Image (cartoon, grey):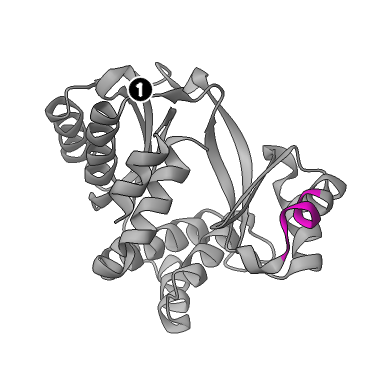
Amino acid sequence: MAGHSQFKNIMHRKGKVDAVRSKVFSKLAREITVAAKMGMPDPAMNPRLRAAILAARAENMPKDNIQRAINKASGGDAENYDEIRYEGYGPGGAAIIVEAMTDNRNRTASDIRSYFTKSGGNLAETGAVSFMFDRVGYIEFGPEVADADAMLEAAIDAGADDVSSSENGHEVYCDQGSLNEVTKALEDKFGEPKASKLVWKPQTPVAVDDETGEKLMKLMESLEEHDDVQNVYGNFELSDALMQKMAE
């Protein structure tokens, strides 16, 4: 999935998640609370909440923390967050989408803009780059649940459109409207997925040179570490050599 998956894999290999676990839990809790507040507090009746809980479990977030975040939504004291999508161009003209939840739009916009500017890129208007991406359903499984052929066959049978398998696991893509149905079919066969959510998938990933790639990864990391940022997507692809270098 171009920039998003490569970024995620590099951070995973570097153990970045462990280093910022409290920040990760905070972002996951925020998504759980917002999802529960917007819909039913029952994950069986609220696909977004179920996806948020799956993401929390994948990061080994304690059950008490998850339940506390759900309860916060109905307690009347939950903060009000605005969901905002920022779009811009990073080094080399790579397209980047940033999804954020914030209780202070001005602060977040100022911070995000500064990250883009410092990297040599620029923040653009909403819609400036999203046309280069497709909004699709994304389901992730670990590599141990099946081999590539078995996952591909099961995914196609379930109604998915595409599967990408590697040593890191399986990434299944489907139409955004069929995410719940495809997820349930695969869950019945392979167990609970590590993730099931809507993502921005680049239509045509763009290869970048290593110097530009390093600048882009620094920008992605800065954005990802911001407290208000939930997800970051890019349409660039790094070379295998740079991937290996940055994972070390």
- For the C terminus, the quadrant is bottom left
Asked whether 37 or 183 is in front, the reply is 183
Question: With 163 as the anchor, is 113 left or right in this view?
Answer: left
Asked whether 221 or 81 is in front, the reply is 221
Q: Position of residue 7 (x, y in %)?
A: 38, 45
- Mark 1: which amino acid? Ala
Rendered residue at 42%/19% (across/down) = 129
Q: Which residues are magenta?
A: 146-152
Q: Position of residue 58 (x, y in %)?
A: 50, 68
Question: Magenta region's main secondary structure?
Answer: helix
How many marks on residues?
Answer: 1
Rendered residue at 24%/51% (across/down) = 225
The extreme front residue here reads 241
SS state under label 1: loop
Crowding near the residue tagged with mark 1, few <14, some 14–19, many ≥20 C-alpha atoms within 10 Å: many
Q: Which residue was labeled with disc 1?
A: 94
Q: Position of residue 100 (x, y in %)?
A: 34, 43
Question: With 215 as the anchor, is 247 left or right in this view?
Answer: right
Q: Examine the structure image and report whether residue 79 is included in the region drawn in magenta.
A: no
Residue 233 seen in the figure: yes
92 relative to 5, above or below: above
